[in-house]
């Protein structure tokens, strides 16, 4: 079978691959790029374990062909943390025990991140509706909702944090915006 050369920006890094036209994005991420945080759960788009962001939109990567991602931006769970600092959603899932086996967690966090980008202060009902396409077979969702609520507060506080002044080694004052989440 013939292959097609594609370039995909994944977590801010341009990546290239020669792929068969039938290869799914989830398999490109996992098998070609080694980003195994995106899980394959059902291959039918029912569970949401494969959720990533494609050009800023939530997408189930088991329903997207890798060639459809050519020239586009993909963000995976591996791109959420800032070095050793967890994203507020990751921290919320940790703090609120929003996971048990962890299989659904990457997709759940990616969906929740998209939700919070659309609605920074969702109600419990809006959170439940926003993650309704992502299945968890372990937790019953109570702690997942709490985790997302915690993250919403953390992100809101970070967004409203005052601008901090600092000094360079030459003694000149500089202004630094708070670090952007996500």
Image (tube, helix red, strand yellow):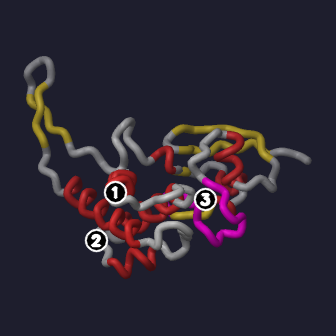
Residue 56 image label: none
Residue lying farthest to the top in this orientation: 170
Q: Judging from the image, what secondary structure is the residue with disc 3 in? A: loop
Residue 92 image label: 1
Q: Which residue is mark 2?
A: 121
Using the image, determine if residue 134 lies above or below residue 96. below
Q: Position of residue 70 (x, y in %)?
A: 66, 50
* Residue located at (61% from left, 59% from top): 50
Cα–Cα gap, marks 2 and 1? 15 Å
Q: Give the left or right position of residue 60, taking residue 173 as reference.
A: right
Q: Judging from the image, what secondary structure is the residue with disc 1 in? A: helix
* Residue located at (68% from left, 53% from top): 25
Using the image, determine if residue 132 lies above or below residue 161. below
Q: Quadrant of residue 44?
A: bottom right
Cα–Cα gap, marks 3 and 2? 25 Å
Residue lying farthest to the right in this orientation: 1
Q: Which residue is mark 3?
A: 50
The disc, 3 or 2, on the residue closer to the chain's N-terminal end is: 3
Q: Judging from the image, what secondary structure is the residue with disc 2 in? A: loop
Task: Report the mark closest to the observer, 2 or 1.
Answer: 1
Q: Quadrant of residue 168?
A: top left
Q: Give the left or right position of residue 53, taking residue 61 as reference.
A: left
Using the image, determine if residue 156 lies above or below residue 32. below
* Residue located at (30% from left, 48% from top): 180
Q: Is residue 160 visible?
A: yes
């Amino acid at each position: 079978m013939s292959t097609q050369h594609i370039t995909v920006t994944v977590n801010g890094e341009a990546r290239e691959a020669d792929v068969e036209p039938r290869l799914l994005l989830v398999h490109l991420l996992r098998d070609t790029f080694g980003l195994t945080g995106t899980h394959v759960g059902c291959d039918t788009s029912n569970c949401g374990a494969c959720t990533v962001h494609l050009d800023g939109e939530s997408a189930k990567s088991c329903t997207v062909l890798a060639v459809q991602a050519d020239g586009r931006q993909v963000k995976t769970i591996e791109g959420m943390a800032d070095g050793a600092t967890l994203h507020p959603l990751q921290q919320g899932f940790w703090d609120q025990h929003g996971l048990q086996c962890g299989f659904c967690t990457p997709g759940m966090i990616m969906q929740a991140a998209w939700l919070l980008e659309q609605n920074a202060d969702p109600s419990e009902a809006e959170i439940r509706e926003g993650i309704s396409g992502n299945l968890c077979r372990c937790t019953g969702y109570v702690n997942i909702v709490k985790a997302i609520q915690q993250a919403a507060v953390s992100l809101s506080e970070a967004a409203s944090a005052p601008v901090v002044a600092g000094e360079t080694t030459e003694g000149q004052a500089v202004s630094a915006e708070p670090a952007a989440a996500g």
